[in-house]
Image (cartoon, rainbow, N blue to C red):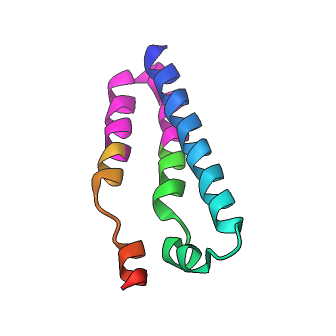
Amino acid sequence: MAVALYGFVLFAAAIAYTILVRVLLAAPGNELLASALGSDFKGKISMVIYVTAIPLAFLRPSLACVLYILVAAIWLIPDRRIERKLS
């Protein structure tokens, strides 16, 4: 139960991040940022993994934790898209 609740908190943070990105991209003058972010693959795949891990937490909590760690590892890999667009 605790692992599923933790996953729900992580999923809520991913939703908040998605909302933040959409609001930033909707603001005028952010065309460069929008082109740098593109389809926001990391954000989308994170949400998919969280949605998969939450019900899995009731069956195999250790496997759900591995999926949470996978998302953290994905976000630890530096994303150079914005730097490339600015230079």
Residue 63 covered by magenta stretch: yes
Q: Is residue 64 left or right of residue 22?
A: left
Instruction: Residue at 53%, 48% (x, y): give it.
Output: 48
Instruction: Residue at 28%, 58% (x, y): give it.
Output: 77
Check the image and report above or below for 60 versus 73.
above
Residue 81 covered by magenta stretch: no
**Residue 3: x percent and y percent?**
43, 20
Q: Nearer the viewer, residue 71 or 27?
A: 27
Q: Nearer the viewer, residue 56 or 9?
A: 9
Q: Quadrant of residue 72?
A: top left
Q: Nearer the viewer, residue 65 or 13?
A: 13
**Residue 40: x percent and y percent?**
52, 64
Residue lying farthest top?
1
Where does the C terminus fall, quadrant-wise? bottom left
Q: Is residue 3 left or right of residue 28?
A: left
**Residue 30: x percent and y percent?**
61, 74
Check the image and report above or below for 15 versus 40.
above
Q: Nearer the viewer, residue 11 or 65?
A: 11
Q: Tally the numbered discs.
A: 0
Check the image and report above or below for 9 versus 34.
above
Q: Is residue 7 left or right of residue 16?
A: left
Magenta stretch bounds: 50-71
**Residue 62: x percent and y percent?**
32, 25
Check the image and report above or below for 46 versus 78.
above
Instruction: Residue at 60%, 43% (x, y): give it.
Output: 16
Main SS, magenta residues: helix
Instruction: Residue at 71%, 73% (x, y): give it.
Output: 28
Residue lying farthest bottom?
87
